[in-house]
Amino acid sequence: MDFEEDFASFLGISPEKSVFNLKELMDERQTIFPTKIEKDSSLKFSLRNSSSEKTFLLVQIIGNNEKGFFPAFAIDITKDELLQEKVRNLAYTDMTTNVPNRESFTLKVESLNQKCLSKSFKSGLLFIDINDSHKIMEIFGHRLFQKMLRETAERLTSVSAKAESSIYNLDSDDFVIVIDDYDNIDQILDIAREVNKMFLDPFMLGDGPFEVSCRIGIVSCPEYQRRTPITPSDMIRYGEITLRLAKSNNDLFILDKESYLAVIKELDMEMDLQNSIRDEELELLYQPIYSFGSNRIIAVEALLSWKSKKHGAVSPSVFIPLAERSGFINKLGDFVIDTSFKFASTLKDKNIFVNFNVSTVQFYQMDFAEKLAARLEYHDLPPQSVGLEITESCLCKDIAELIEKLSMVRKCGIAVSIDDFGTGYCSLSYLKDLPVDYLKIDRSFIMGIETSDKQVKLLKGITNLAKSLGVEIVAEGIETKEQLEAVIGCGCSNIQGFYISKPMNETNTFKFISSYTGPGK
Ligand code: C2E
Ligand code: MG
Ligand code: MG
């Protein structure tokens, strides 16, 4: 009814107007509280002035109703409100990519959960992860990595908009596209195809184009058809698991119950494996290697055995790859090295090697050879007390680095065996350059050798090759007298296998070494 000029200009109305209707300026969707106006109440309005700018007004009633009108102050609180809005947005948006973040995703899942209580529907989520993102980060640095993330977000946002779905950026390079309700799984696969198409164009990083690829894990939620909510953290776990499976499945995986349970079991086992040293569930068993050349046991191979309270006896062919994937292999490897070196120090005067197996991951640690040298010194072991076994498949890498590493290992007085020889599909030409002492012929060459001329010829060939290179041969997995005879006939005199003995604990190994007189020929 009566107001100051400043107030009129703030609202963008003419100061000459004596009465105006605030409702015409109000943003429609707001609820005003309190609904009843009386003395001392304050009300907040969101308004659009004549130039359509968003403003906020706080109205404080200061007196009683006089003939239908209240005296009041009006305060411009636009700056405060916009700042608060920004803070709210920051909490729900990823700062780098400007895409709704993990908090928003949590809200989204909660809203789907709410919806599923009253209605059944099919939701589909595409979890998207950039391949080798840490490498991209290392090559290009933080700033260009962020540029790549922003561009990824833009490309994915356009796919998501076309599919009428919503997109979230859970963390750095982890994105999710959520389709609230779909009819047919092809719809989801189409989106996955679109996402892949988006990555076909290289990204401009640094001076030139760079190819970036992603993997996609699809989670469809049959829970919602049964009207069962899924917690946001479970949903994220489904996503992580399906992405993990996508890694080994051509970068695309649709999560089903079976694979989910298999991964959960693996994760469970992985956790238990990490506690296996503390819980004393790991033991090294030793299997003797007999030489017909010197008619004695020349070495024992340390084989890791895991007797888990929960999972029973787990084979190293299961838990070693598990440990490699989780990064636990280095700790496990250290345990093997220390335990086998300690055992070797009790065999000092017996002139017997204790062989330990190392995994590729472990072997390619920066300071692996130095570490071995330090452990040898710690256990006060003379040269020729321990031997290292490394599988052939490990050798298909950079040959120069390999030669250097193996040479360092041998310089410490550690014998080197190439394990599972013949299974790694490596070029034979590397053999002439490699500093190795033994080739261990894989059991697959021995099985059936007693009745197969071809296998005999093959083993003879390998034995002659090794002899010409000055490398000794060990035949693995000899189980019968017939196999033993066939193998010896091929010129191979070092034998390992159940026919000599199964792997044994330390005490029995010690006894065995002291009393064994040989298998006879
Ligand atoms: P490997 O180094 O080639 O070890 C020989 C495997 O053959 C052992 O299996 C042994 O028990 C088995 N074996 C020996 N003689 C016979 C036989 O006459 N018949 C049959 N059927 N099998 C025989 P295991 O203990 O299950 O180990 C499997 C693989 O796991 C090992 O193959 C090795 O590559 C890996 N491994 C074992 N312990 C360790 C370890 O401490 N570190 C690493 N990195 N790998 C290990
Ligand atoms: Mg071995
Ligand atoms: Mg082997």
Image (spheres, rainbow, N blue to C red):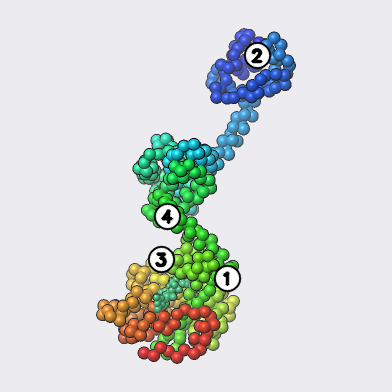
> Which residue is disc 2 drawn over?
5
**Would residue 486 be seen by someone viewing this image from the given angle?**
yes
**Front residue of 420 and 385:** 420
Residue 258 has which mark? 4
Considering only order in the chain, which callout, 3 or 2, is on the residue closer to the N terminus?
Answer: 2
Cα–Cα span, label 3 and label 1: 37 Å
Considering only order in the chain, which callout, 1 or 3, is on the residue closer to the N terminus?
Answer: 1
Dot 4 amino acid type: Glu
Cα–Cα span, label 2 and label 3: 80 Å
Query: Quarter of the image holding residue 454?
Result: bottom left
- Residue 477: image x %, image y %? 39, 78
At 53% across and 74% down in the image, what residue appears? 283
Q: Residues within 10 Å of mark 3 (few under 14, many from 20)?
A: few
Whether pointer 3 and pointer 1 mark residues with C-beta atoms closer than 8 Å, the reply is no
Placement of 387 over or under 216, stated as above or below = below
> Which residue is disc 3 drawn over?
398
**Front residue of 261 and 385:** 261
Cα–Cα span, label 4 and label 2: 72 Å
Placement of 487 over or under 42, stated as above or below = below
At 45% across and 58% down in the image, what residue appears? 262
Q: Residues within 10 Å of mark 2 (few under 14, many from 20)?
A: few
Instruction: Locate residue 425 relative to residue 81 in the image: left or right.
Output: left
- Residue 98: image x %, image y %? 51, 38
- Residue 29: image x %, image y %? 55, 24
**Front residue of 466 and 299:** 299
Dot 3 amino acid type: Asp
- The secondary element bearing badge 2 is classed as helix
Dot 2 amino acid type: Glu
**Would residue 95 be seen by someone viewing this image from the given angle?**
no
Instruction: Locate residue 299 relative to residue 6 in the image: left or right.
Output: left
Residue 280 has which mark? 1
